[in-house]
Amino acid sequence: MTSPLRPAKGAAHCSACEAVCCRLMVVLQPEDQVPEHLTAYSPEGLHVMARGEDGWCVALNSVRMNCGIYETRPSVCRRFVMNGPYCKAIRADYSDPVAAGIQHDTAA
Ligand code: SF4
């Protein structure tokens, strides 16, 4: 019997993910209540969650790899479906270092 709290075998789950979705651009909506110092403006003028040099959202708790403002996270983040098609697609891209834009040091 499968517990409703446990993901199906092979399914993505936030508890075993590097918060890959928190590397995406998060466009803020008028109803979002995010502290201004955690936000930025994109080159196109969109009000977004700021990202650090590492590419992750600045609100991410990098020790626990979970959202540091979970209770007040933006509406876009609330709608993101764990193990949904978009989740699977960005995890697949992230696991491909070329697609994810991750540089590997090839010097030995
Ligand atoms: S606000 Fe939270 S859930 Fe949304 S991208 Fe940032 S860390 Fe992730």
Image: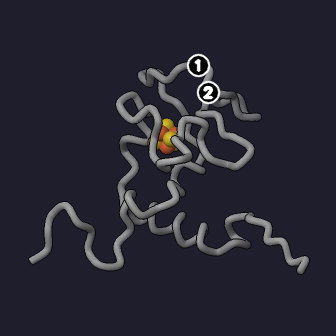
Q: Are marks 1 and 2 in contact (CB under 8 Å)?
A: yes
Percent x, y of residue 88:
45, 68
Disc 1 Cβ-to-ligand 1 distance below 8 Å: no
Q: Which residue is mark 1?
A: 36
User: Which residue is found at the position 58% from the left and 49% from the top?
Assistant: 24
User: Which residue is found at the position 56% from the left and 46% from the top?
Assistant: 62
Percent x, y of residue 93:
60, 69
In the rendered image, which quarter is residue 7 located in?
A: bottom left
Percent x, y of residue 58:
60, 36
Q: Residues within 10 Å of mark 1 (few under 14, many from 20)?
A: few
Q: Amino acid at mark 1?
A: Glu
Comparing 23 with 104, the one in front is 104
Q: Is residue 30 above or below residue 80?
A: above
Q: Which mark is residue 39?
A: 2
Q: Residues within 10 Å of mark 2 (few under 14, many from 20)?
A: some
- For the C terminus, the quadrant is bottom right
Q: Is residue 35 left or right of residue 75?
A: right
- For the N terminus, the quadrant is bottom left
